[in-house]
Image (spheres, rainbow, N blue to C red):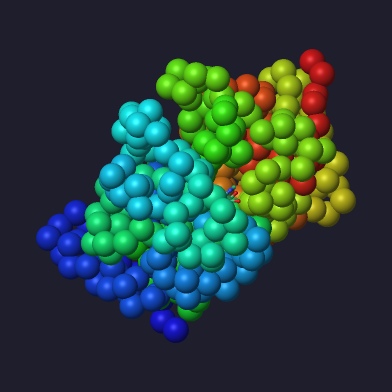
Amino acid sequence: METKIFTIQDDKEDEKKIAEAAELIRSGGLVAMPTETVYGLAANGLDEEACRKIFAAKKRPPDNPLILHITEVEQIKDLIVDYTEKDLRLMEELWPGPMTLIYRKSERIPDAVTAGGDTVAVRIPSHRIARQFIEACGVPLAAPSANVSGRPSPTNARDVLQDMEGRIEGIIDGGDSSIGIESTVVDMTGKVPVILRPGFYTPEFLTHYMGEVRLDDAILDQDVAPRSPGQKYKHYAPKAELRVYVGERKALCTKLQEKVRQLQAQGMKVGVMTFSENMDFIEGDRKIAMGSFEDITQMGSRLFSAFRQMDAWGMDIILMEGVEDSGYGVSLMNRIKKASGGKIERIKG
Ligand code: TXA
Ligand code: MG
């Protein structure tokens, strides 16, 4: 199949392109769309067969459920059953945005969306084009990240095409995703909300709106089995081996430089991903600046595309500077730990 690219150019053609892409969804096809977190691979979320195609295109394990994307809180009343007025108010406050909520599912939801389970994940994205597209489709869109399972999530149309060319009907190119890592997933089915996947909305931020919020134990302890199916797989990984270092700046630069030399002496091509402030102090075959350490959201927006870039350059190994496990750092390190298979070394200063 030919994958059609719909490039959004902020002109009067955009509406036609979005309408054409929506037609592909209504006829049961798959279209990748930009969101503020990462690109999603969308299908009609009420069409069992269309949702099954997502699993095939992504080679996704069948036990891993999908997120439904809508544009108005009102629409959730058809999709879930166990909400209260308080829940609806919370949704009005926190959506649209990079957060997914899990509730008990209604009868309308196909099994392919929930992987046979009795709960469903829902999100209202804030991305303008995503919202226009969902509205044009006129149905909730089931959309996981638009990568082949296990690979880094795509944050631009080029990265989607790399994984999905010939496997899906279309891609809406709406530029770079600003956040760059996936939404915070919160299980709302118990007494206390539980974060199953950390994201841009941190526990500290959510507590302000929700009161007590817990982090699933598996997020900080790699030996605990996660409650969210998607969290149990090795994930987000570049093809190159990834090793991560955390610690005091000066000692870390010295250590990284030493490692680069050792590995190069063994004939390896070594890529380095470090904060902008440290770029001049570490050599490497290729280097990518992860933004300033004073604003780690920049690291988030570059993380996945940097992994793919290192692979495109043919690096054998990537040495990367990590961050502390606090605040947004927990979310970034969650992705980085999974991508590296847990290879994190703490450098003592
Ligand atoms: O930011 C995002 O969430 C992006 C954009 C496209 O919206 N989507 C995304 O979808 O990251 P995906 O499928 O790559 O990740 C969904 C995560 C998985 O870890 C999955 O296991 C979990 O949400 N999930 C979905 N439904 C669930 C459910 N009913 N119970 C527990 N976990 C669920
Ligand atoms: Mg994913």
Q: Can you say whether 44 is above or below 66 in the image? A: below
Is residue 265 visible from the viewing direction of this image? yes
The quarter of the picture where the N terminus appears is bottom left
**What residue appears at the point 65 percent right and 61 percent down from the top-left corner?**
63
Judging depth in this view, the residue of 87 and 253 nearest the camera is 87
Q: Residue at point 45% right, 18% down?
A: 208
**Quarter of the image containing the C terminus?**
top right
User: How many marks on residues?
Assistant: 0
In this view of the protein, which residue sits in the foreground, 254 or 235? 235
Instruction: Farthest residue to the left: give it.
Output: 12
Residue furthest bottom as drawn: 1
Query: Residue 32 in the image: x percent, y percent?
Result: 41, 63
* Residue 291 horizontal/vertical position (percent): 51, 32
Frontmost residue, 168 versus 188: 188
Front residue of 87/207: it is 87
Is residue 205 among the parts visible in the rendering? no
Residue at coordinates 26% horizontally, 62% vertically from top-left?
A: 138
Q: Position of residue 62 (x, y in %)?
A: 64, 65
The residue positioned 17% from the left and 62% from the top of the image is: 15
User: Residue 243 at what x, y percent from top left?
Assistant: 76, 41
